[in-house]
Image (cartoon, rainbow, N blue to C red):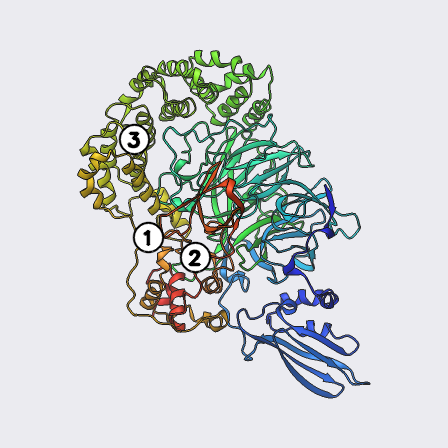
Amino acid sequence: MNYPASRSQPLPRFRLKSALLALALACLAQVELAHGAKDPTDVTAVVAGAVKDDKLSITAGNDLFGDTASGVPKKLHIEYTLGDEKVSRDVGENRKLEIAAPAGKKLVITKAVYGPADGSKPKTVAVVTENPGELLATLPGFKVELVRKADAATEGSWISITKDPKGRLLLGAEPKEPISRLTLKDGKVTKAEILKIPLSEVMGMLFAFDSLYINGRGNGPDGKSVYGLWRCTSTTAEEAFDKVEFLREWKGGGGDHGAHTILLNPDKKHLNVLCGNFVDVPADVLPTSPHKNYADDLVLPRAEDGNGFGAGRKPPGGFVVRMDPDGKNCELVASGERNTYGVAFNHDGELFGFDSDMEWDWGTPWYRPVRVYHVTSGADHGFREGASKWPEYYHDSLPATVTIGIGCPTGVGFGTGAKFPAKYQRAFFIQDWTYGRLIAVHLTPQGASYGGTWENFVAPKSLNEKSGKTPLNLTGLTIGDDGAMYFTIGGRHTQGALFRVTYEGSESTAPADLHEVAGAESRTLRHKLESFHGHEDAAAVDTAWPHLASEDRFIRYAARIAIESQPINSWKARALAETNPTSALTILLSVARLGGTEAQGDLFKALAKISPAQLKSEAQQLELIRIIEVAISRMGKPAAEVAAPIIALLSPLYPAQSVALNRELCQTLLALDAPDTIARTLKLLAAAPTQEEQLNYVVALRTITNGWTPEMRRQYFAWWAQKRNTTQHPETTLKWFTDAGRDFSDGASFGNFLVKIRRTAMANVPPEELAALQPVLDSWIEPAPKLKKPKKDRTFVKNWQMSDLIGDLDKLSKGRNFAQGQDAVNGTLCLMCHRIGDEGGSVGPDLTAVASRYSPQVILEALIEPSKVISEQYANTDITLKNGNFFTGRIVGDTDDKIILRPSMLAPDTKEISKADIKTKETSKLSPMMPGLLNTLTKEEILDLLAYFQAAGKPEGAAFKK
């Protein structure tokens, strides 16, 4: 249904009073100049531009001048002449000023200052928008400069960027914030516009098919707010996009884990849309989709996140869909990502993304680092919620292309069209919001896919410093028509800005040939196999079969999906009779996935014929075990006589020499009730050097009910009371943290994972055995946050406001008191909910690296006004029942018929609510964090507390040095 933009409700935050509209338009050029002024309080040009017929009527406020001194009362001071007479006037913030020149005299504004009411200059801390050249590091020959700092009141905080056919930049912003359009010349803004498109929370934009496609929130055909895919076109020469069509809804599409990038497919006939793991796969995906038949495929029961995040959500996780220009004929292309924000095609039409981690999983074996991955037809990249994430060696998934480590992935893009050296024209640029790293990934063809290396392209110079971090909240990038890279910062209501990267070095920037000759033959073969995906073709099985034995994992994968797309009766017998070990390990996985219970016996007989001696590598041993796991998951636990040959095949291999083999053998043999598996697993648990390996065994044993002796149970539960050396982690894991400029710490869910694993295991202990186990059970107390008693009793000091403290933030860099800051943290009970390093709770955001993400001003604002910005990961949900009852809390479970709500994350109690009884369910506008937590601190203690956050709780922070 089409409807004009004017029918939608306007965005209230940006509604201008009619009396100011003409003034705002008249002053547009002057406002643009003001953005580049060294003194933001100098508003002379704006006020002078408002004089009409020697009269001035103006309201002094942030709507007109911007917030030139955040958090403090302001005034407008004007100096002017009336003929020969010099006059000055002051007017308070949001007050109206009217001046009319007497007849025969001219009104001339000579000076206008909008700043602190006490006449002082605004005090600020160093921020990246003030002097990027001094605060940001880039590679030799490159230069970074600020193009424009967003006006928070009118432009919002920028979270996406695209380029229109005329080379203008469109900048999307957060909820209830508009789309901006910037015209540039020589890297300077010559015109800035706010488009009247009635959409906000814009996380994806694309110009294609003479239209602007948007993933955003607006009012649907029924007048209700909906997050979806929209098509915007202009019916006039002004390119105002006055026609807005709603194409399809993305259920769960709003928020950080929603619907993101829109791309034009290389065939120039279709759209590709990227969605995060909280978006439901559209119900109308075509049966011809290349990707289907996905499941958890776990051999043992799934463990949900320790804090309940994503609990109950089933596969496929994040995904990519392809559709026609009308948003119809939708096909699921690939899935198994977590929450990729950006994807991009290279010059050969290959699609790449930068996927996020679940930082709450730090310290666990199921933590998946942020990674660059290759999106191929039918791909599953293995993300599952909770502890169910697949290891990369599962051959029913595809591995990462390049592993980065920790971070928060946002925008991506290739250097195509950049006036950069050839290496960087080919580079895949990715952005890390949390640690402010704009990374250049150098992809190298490897068979039918790619590998690669990476380096920091732009990053704060403070990245590896202990304190004084410079936030660089990267959100999007594009290559401009001038050959420069443009990137945005913003998000979570942080300061939005646009930057430009140019190359001034001596290397050639002539357009390079970006086509990759290496690997072209393998990629062509993969594409041929992919052409069979999703639909029946009589030639598919015979064409694909020889490639089941390929040495190239991506070729084997493509061949398997081509065969799975055909009727199973056309290839199952051939699969069961396959004698080539590599081919058999590939195609028998398909039998496990699609054969059904009736095929289990024949499948296990075929597997039992494969001798471990036939297998060329550990990878093939893992593939054999994986087929058994998938078969048990999809077909059910086999009868004893069916399982016996498989146990005989696997049991001699356990324990093995590698962590990966022991993980898979452990859980598979436990699932099959193989004799002596618990005893062997406990020996591995006792000998495992790292926390991550130990957890493999602890999690696997938690649901096992048979085969225990009292001594085995005692050994198992004694593990919780052991002191685990926090430095015992894989070296690669520790390096991920070093690369991001911070120390390792366990994730926010770690403590509650331990609690839930133990509770599950205790529930499987027969009641008659519990008494004997009580001493060992009592040796470990479920962890409460590590709270230190404050050194002083605290009473009410003041109801602090931003205006009381903003002017003192320049005192954070030196002379602070570490002990006093630490005591302030303890006195305000920050660690009850938040973690700093390895101390504290897990129900709120980890504050260890908070200074890398936010400026001191933003941190202070979050402490004083906690409900102003609430991350969806920590937001409560308000539920009103049909009978009028009201509940609020964190959703920790979600099934087809009920919701499990935890009213307080500091208490274990939960509330089950039937979905049939719910009238409304919406995200709470109130933060779980209470206001007024700083009111028992003095000003100096608050500043010490902020310095403590900036130093990540470390006494060697620069602010604490004498």
Question: Counting residues from the N terminus, which is met first, the one under dot 2 or under dot 3?
Answer: 3
| Quadrant location of the C terminus in the rendered image | bottom left
Q: Nearer the viewer, residue 156 or 18?
A: 18
Provide residue 321's location: percent of width, then percent of height: 59, 35
Residue at which label 1 appears: 838
Q: Quadrant of the N terminus?
A: top right
| Label disc, if present, on residue 828 of the rendered structure | none
User: Which of the marked residues, 3 or 1, is nearer the chain's N terminus?
Assistant: 3
C-alpha distance separating marks 3 and 1: 31 Å
Q: What secondary structure is found at the residue carrying circle 1?
A: loop
Q: Residue at x 47, y 18 (%)?
A: 595
Residue 71 sits above or below residue 531 on the image: below
Quadrant location of residue 757? top left
Q: Nearer the viewer, mark 2 or mark 3?
A: 3
> Do we see residue 503 in this rendering?
no
Q: Residue furthest bottom?
A: 85
The answer to which of 257 and 112 lies nearer the viewer is 257
Label of residue 850 in the image: 2
Q: Amino acid at mark 3?
A: Ile
Nearest to viewer (mark 3 / mark 1) = 3
Instruction: Name the outermost residue toward the front.
Output: 883
In the rendered image, residue 691, in percent from the top left (x then y), is placed at 30, 42
Instruction: Please determine whether, in this image, residue 464 is positioned above or below residue 376.
Output: below
Read off the residue under disc 3.
704
* Left or right of 533 on screen, residue 731: left
Tag 2 and tag 1, C-beta contact below 8 Å: no
Q: In the drawing, does residue 707 fall left or right of residue 419?
A: left
**476 or 638: which is nearer to us?**
638
Kind of residue sitting beneath label 1: Asp
Gap between marks 2 and 3 measured at Cα: 40 Å
Q: Residues within 10 Å of mark 1 (few under 14, many from 20)?
A: some
